[in-house]
Amino acid sequence: VQLQASGGGLVQAGGSLRLSCAASGLTFSGYSMGWFRQAPGKERAFVAAIGWSGGSTYYTDSLKGRFTISRDNAKNAVYLQMNSLKPEDTAVYYCAASGTPFGQGLARAEGYAYWGQGTLVTVSS
């Protein structure tokens, strides 16, 4: 299984980025997908999750309204649209795949079987 995250980069505060995660080696439509992030010196933190069909989404409260998770099962891809970015959003962003049913358990890293390598997002002030 491979999860390849991309789309990170340097952006000014207030700007937007769209992260992508391409999956291979698994039946993508059978997995819930999530995004996590790890800021310098901090633990990995949950960002958002989406169910296998795309009809169910879940966000960490602090990011609701600014970040949107979506998926395209035909392309085996999951996305994270990030708007109104702030310097505190600076982190390495990871995508992950979970074979467990969609629910609040997806907010925990332990709920995921596969992880991508991460893509760095840097937001300048």
Image: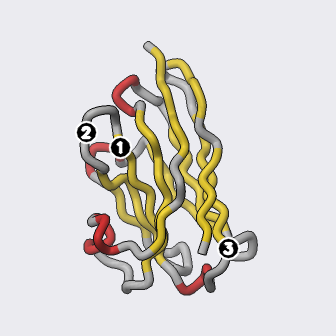
Other residues around mark 3 within 10 Å, as few (<14) / some (14–19) / many (≥20): some
Which tag, 2 or 3, sits closer to the chain's start?
A: 3
At 56% from the left and 23% from the top, the residue drawn is: 11
Q: Amino acid at mark 2?
A: Lys
x and y percent of residue 19 in the render? Answer: 59, 47
The amino acid type, in three-letter code, at marker 3 is Ser
Circle 2 Cα neighbour tier, 10 Å, few/some/many (<14 / 14–19 / ≥20): few
Q: Which residue is mark 1?
A: 38
Q: Residues within 10 Å of mark 1 (few under 14, many from 20)?
A: some
Label placed on residue 24: 3
Judge left or right: residue 108 versus residue 70. left
* Residue 110 occupies quadrant: bottom left
Asked whether the residues under the numbered discs 1 and 2 touch, taking CB atoms below 8 Å apart as contact, a structural biologist would say yes
Q: How many marks?
A: 3
Which label is found at residue 99?
none
Q: Closer to the camera, 67 or 30?
A: 30
Q: Secondary structure at mark 1?
A: strand
Vertically, is 52 above or below 94?
below
Query: Disc 1 to disc 2, how far (Cα)?
Result: 6 Å
Cα–Cα span, label 2 and label 3: 29 Å
Query: Which residue does the numbered mark 2 point to in the structure image?
Result: 42
Q: Earlier in the sequence, mark 1 or mark 3?
A: 3
Q: What residue lies at 46% left-to-right and 30% top-to-bottom?
A: 85
Tag 1 and tag 3, C-beta contact below 8 Å:
no
* Cα separation between marks 1 and 3: 24 Å
Dot 3: what SS? strand
Question: Residues at badges 2 and 3 in contact (C-beta under 8 Å)?
Answer: no
What scheme was used to colour the molecule?
secondary structure
